[in-house]
Amino acid sequence: MRRPRVLGSLGLGGTLALAGLVGFALLALGAMIGLYAQNFEQAVGPEHLSPGPGAWLGTDALGRDLLARTIQGARVSLAVGLGGAVGLVALGTALGALAGLRGRAVDRVLAGLTDAVAAVPPVVMLLGAALVLSPGISTAILAISLTQWTGVFRSIRAEAMRMRSADHDRAAVAMGAGYWHRIRWHLLPRLRPLLITSLVLSFVYAVKIEAVLAFFGASSRTLPSWGRLLAESGSELARGIWWPIAAASVPLALLVLCAQVVADRLTDDEPGG
Amino acid sequence: MLLRRLLSAAVTLVLVSVLVFFVVDALADQVTQDLGRAASPEALAARRHLLGLDRPVLLRLWQHVSSAMSFEFGESARHGHPVASLLARSLLPTLAYAVPGFLLATASALFGGFCAARWRGWPGRILLGLATILMSTSSVIIVVIGQYLLAHRLRSFPVLGWPLPGDARDVLGFIVLPALLWAVIQLGPDLRHYRAVFLRELAAPHLEGLRARGLGEFRVARHVLRGSAAPVLARVSARLPHLVIGSVVIEHVFNIPGVGALLIAAIQDGDLAVVQGIAFCLAAATIAGQALCDLAVFTLDPRTRARPEAGR
């Protein structure tokens, strides 16, 4: 089995990728507290102005500054990525720990439920949930957390079951340790590397899902999202208007790539690789 | 063991249909979807009675589950056709481009994954890096830019559309580009997965034994392939349900009347019977795929036969 390594030896590529992630986070944070990129709703020039001084990434079909819209889009991707990752890992861990430590009937029921939830393809669940509820960032986070926890559940459950047969856990039980104590002091420390990796991988997954949701208009309606920008300007490519697509796809691909490289470095255990 | 597997598959399927019922029942209001938010309470109640929504929950649950088991999902609120026939009609366009794309992607991912695992120096690193970049590029980006480059720029394919029934002209032209883009989307993650599988298998100690006995590298590679049959099959079967749904993005951009397009239209129209039908059918396909995969592993890999309960 792959044993994830704890943060620390990320290597050059991993460190660069982590720096990239921090950069994206700072960019989104600055936009959120209102330091820059606040004029993303107003027209600053003629429509489809090509990149140049005044509008560094050009303008969109309504003459709005694409640089400001791209920076605001980072807020959506990061919020859904972080929220979705934390939500699904938390839910999967809680249920997995419950199933693994309790065993018997609880385990049967939860495992059956997981099989059923995992059997419905993610696209159906996510688009259905996001469009039936009113579209928005919180809906996207909720939809991702409530439907995509099954993978985390399975790995945490397996680890909890393995722990149940370990001596230190048996000793703790013999001394009268309750479930909460066992989860807090025995299971969580054991799971830390696994949880960190799951978080990063879930972040990658959630960001990609957000792009697809936004493409179908099921993500944020108030903030410009990269997925929505791609949907809006895909047909303009044929007229030679490439900058809206570039402004949406380059940061989206970079963000996912950074997170993916960090995740790879965390799980990298190849001899000499 | 086989019987138990089938039984658990059936139980899961029933659970799925219960789950779908409760999610739709709790989250969506079919009556308001049909009549609009401004409808009077009397009209809503009358509609509710007409659709039988005022009956007890357990009774409706029972009817929903039993009719889902016979693949009866009622009629689409928008089109008036039975859901099953709508699904069957959109299955063909999806499979027409998804199956070639899937085969192409799986073959090249297996080949690329094996090469990247076998030659781990520069060739392997370059392959791995390319796969990582491909995987990090959202499917939305791949489809939008792929359509532009290959259809608009190179003009080698029709930009979008689907041949009308009976019109055999240009069928290939409409299929090739979606299939190609499908393969590109699937290639990145699959190549990385198969590389990891082959790496594990190439490190197995029995290969040294084979080499020590003087077997050629080609014969050794055959042993590696057979040894990794189980994880490869598991991956393929996990991918099978994607075949049925297709890529919603591809079908949306290329205007293909497939299952994904049906799903999007149904969700946007609030056509809950269709959404329920699609969810249930795809879950059934997933569960059937898993059961088939277990069966195939059972016949292919002697280790699972020797210890049938291992790994369960």
Image (cartoon, helix red, strand yellow):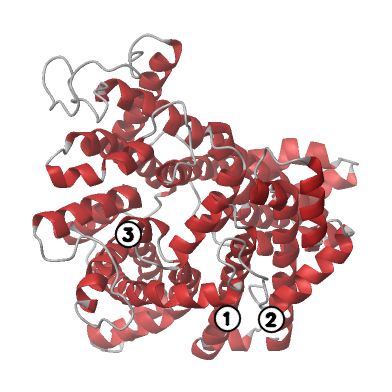
Q: Can residue A273 be seen from the camera position used here? A: no
- Using the numbered discs, state the Cα–Cα distance from disc 1 to disc 3 in whole angstroms: 26 Å
- On the picture, is A254 further left or further right than B205? left
- Observer-nearest of B11 and B84: B84
Task: Please tell me whether mark 3 sits on a helix, a strand or a loop.
Answer: helix
Task: Please tell me whether mark 1 sits on a helix, a strand or a loop.
Answer: helix
Report if the CB atoms under discs 3 and 2 are less than 8 Å apart: no
Tag on residue B294? 1
To which residue does mark 2 refer? B5
- A26 over A131 or under it: above or below: above
To which residue does mark 3 refer? B185
Amino acid type of the residue that numbered disc 2 sits on in the rendered structure? Arg
- Using the numbered discs, state the Cα–Cα distance from disc 3 to disc 2 in whole angstroms: 32 Å
**Which residue is at the far top?**
A35
Amino acid type of the residue that numbered disc 3 sits on in the rendered structure? Ile
Other-residue count near label 2 (Cα within 10 Å), few / some / many at <14 / 14–19 / ≥20: few
- B77 over B83 or under it: above or below: above
- Using the numbered discs, state the Cα–Cα distance from disc 2 to disc 1 in whole angstroms: 9 Å
Question: What x and y, as percent, mark residue A214?
Answer: 43, 41
- On the picture, is A173 further left or further right than A141? right
Q: Earlier in the sequence, mark 3 or mark 2?
A: 2
Question: What x and y, as percent, mark residue A123?
Answer: 51, 56
Q: Chain of mark 3?
A: B
Please tell me whether mark 1 or mark 3 is closer to you in this view: 3
